[in-house]
Image (tube, rainbow, N blue to C red):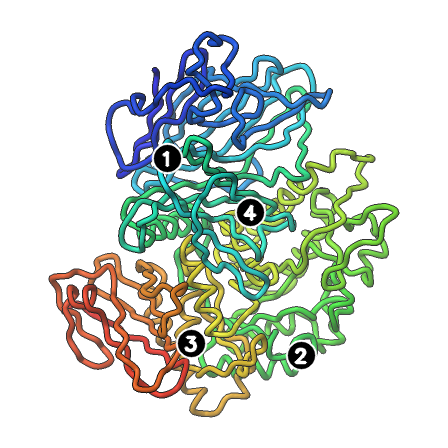
Amino acid sequence: MKTITMQTRRTTYQMGIMEHGFLLHLYYGPRTEGSAENLLSYNDRGFSGNPYEVKEKREISMDYLPQEYSCYGNGDFRSPAFRMKDENGVFAADLRYLSSKRYEGKYMIPGLPAVYADTEEAYTVEVLLRDKATGVEVTLRYGVLPELDVITRSTEVWNNGKKKVYLDKVFSASLDFLTGDFDLLHFYGRHAMERNIERVPVSHGGLGFGSRRGASSHQHNPFVILAEKETTEKYGGCWGMSFLYSGNFWFEAEKDQFEQTRMQMGILPEMFEYPLAPGERFYSPEVAMAYTDEGLAKLSHIYHELIRRHVCRGKFRDIRRPVLINNWEATYFDFTGSQILDIARQAAELGVEMFVLDDGWFGKRDNEDAGLGDWAANEKKIGMSLSALSEKIHDMGMKFGLWIEPEMVNEDSELFRKHPDWAFRIPGRMPVMGRNQLTLDFSRKEVVDHIFEQISGNLEKARIEYIKMDMNRSINDVYTAVNGCQNFGEIMHRYVLGVYDFLERLTTRFPDLLVEGCCGGGGRFDAGMLYYTPQIWCSDDTDAIERIYIQNGTSFGYPISAVGSHVSAVPNHQTGRTVSLHTRAVVAMSGSFGYELDLNTLTEKEKEEVRGQIRAYKENWELLHEGRYYRLTDLCAHPDAAAWSFVSRDREEMLLNIVNINVHANAPVSYIRCMGLLPEKMYKVQETGKMFSGAALMTVGFPVPVVMGEYNAWQYHFICV
């Protein structure tokens, strides 16, 4: 059997080519040498069908042999990665190996985000498959980053035949395991409570989840982990898949009749039917895969480094982003220019570096019912031009930013009155409303062009260094009026391509602009969006205690440099909870730090505390954003204290963060076991002068102070001596 092998520093990925061109998956795990062909076992499986060419060899069946890229129609009755139908509606495919090649550097994907790398940092493997009956050719692309232990996957489908076909399912990655008893770690939630971790066993049958909401969603995140049963933060084998896509997606994990497991990910097949005329091509979004046998923390570190250095781009990839203040929870829609300047003036005095004007600055936008789509400043409301407001804020020594929601429109807007057909609505049906707004059809270039020119006009007239790009509803009523188009199964994918086109043009024309993604908070928190926006507003829930859980789940697949996190007012606007200013800041520092309140409402003592918080964030920025992040408490186990740390790359410095969640009378001392330190070294706590050995901190732990009251927080800075 001919094999195709990809090696990273610590892992090996191998596939094998059987007689007659069947492409099998052989191995993905710790680095090894040689062929894994002998791991396969050939048996007569009764009702499992056999390819026509080998019908006398009943031990050969695609129904149980591990597939590299499974397809519907070749005898494999497990969930396929690829499914298509012809013009007559017949579902059939039989993809056979034609050729493969390897070249230096990392492939890219037209119109889609993808992991990037310098030529010497990566290599690409391409495997060409063909369906003989239709002439359809499928190229499997693998991008290998050896030092990171990352392998990316994407699929290109080319109709090299003479008749149109329809792609019904084109997953980007599929992975078969011959053996193993696994758990699946996935991240579920809802608006204002995203990315809660859930660990469930992979059992017989299928386990699937995803999004049909038009965005990757608050409900399920397109990042998953398949882990061996005994895997913990410190030990055990685990495989990750991160989907670089911001629209509808689907993940499946399936244990079959022979105790084998398949995991796969791609665009949601439901309501997806992509027509491919002769000569046309389709490119699937990318999945970034990683494996480690060193536990969940190590897997997270791989993805953190991947996203920081090989997904995020632009000026703000590696530098500290400005500490900002956003006026939303201070004023909502009800503000004047003088109120905005009062908030900004106090923020500037305390050391805040950027003011962001949120929703309500444009059109007739005094509530949720009007104005979206009309991206001209409401000078009557502001009391001056946008340029004049920007200059006044710059005169205070701060930068200036704006909130936008370019994909949406209100019926009460000039844009909708002029172009009602630009919004998703189905003729003859009343549309489903969300936040009293409709979704613009970003699958149409003229729509994207118009919105882009409006937004660009504001950026060219005024000094604007930051944009918060929001999306505040799920997508319904998908219909396009273009040329009587009947291929509705492709609209949602083309919509996402339109969003990416908008962002690519925005960041290209304005390379010094910091763009923060947002979708009702964390409803589009995915690696695809991070290709264009180096940070994303993590959640509309700004409650510090809730944010501990949200940011904990987020940390499994995304670095804190990607997390937008602010200190907000108390009682909190989402929960009514009151938490100290110190605790709010400790939690918010595990992200791109800022404030979401009117600082004029604070006492003089609190204002001085804010000055100290900003100084501390700046002093610790390199450790926070470049250090390795460790989850030190299992929040699913409901501990009395939540703890996490940042450890420098040389392991000689640590910032330990602890928040007391529950208090008890006559309570025992809680100990936080640290990770990632040098066991033979001594560490001094800067705040107390106490000394601890690395071994003791990692074996016994750091004692949490026993104090009265809930939600106390501590931040300890350890230095190796």
Between discs 3 and 2, the one toward the N terminus? 2
Q: Which residue is disc 3 drawn over? A: 585
Q: Which residue is disc 4 drawn over? A: 209
Q: CA distance from mark 4 to mark 1?
A: 27 Å
Nearer to us of marks 1 and 2 is: 1
The answer to whether residue 3 is above or below residue 412 is above
Q: CB of mark 2 within 8 Å of CB of mark 4?
A: no
The residue at the point 28 percent across, 44 percent down is 293
**Picture quarter with the N terminus:** top left
Amino acid type at image mark 3: Ala
Between discs 2 and 4, the one toward the N terminus? 4
The answer to whether residue 515 is above or below residue 62 is below
Amino acid type at image mark 4: Phe
Question: For this view, does 405 lie left or right of residue 258?
Answer: right
How packed mark 2 is, by other alpha carbons closer than 10 Å (few <14, some 14-19, many 20 or more), is some
Q: What residue occupies the far right of the structure in this picture? A: 428
Question: For this view, does 553 lie left or right of residue 657?
Answer: right
Q: Which residue is disc 2 drawn over? A: 337
Q: CA distance from mark 3 to mark 1?
A: 39 Å
State which quadrant residue 573 falls in: bottom right
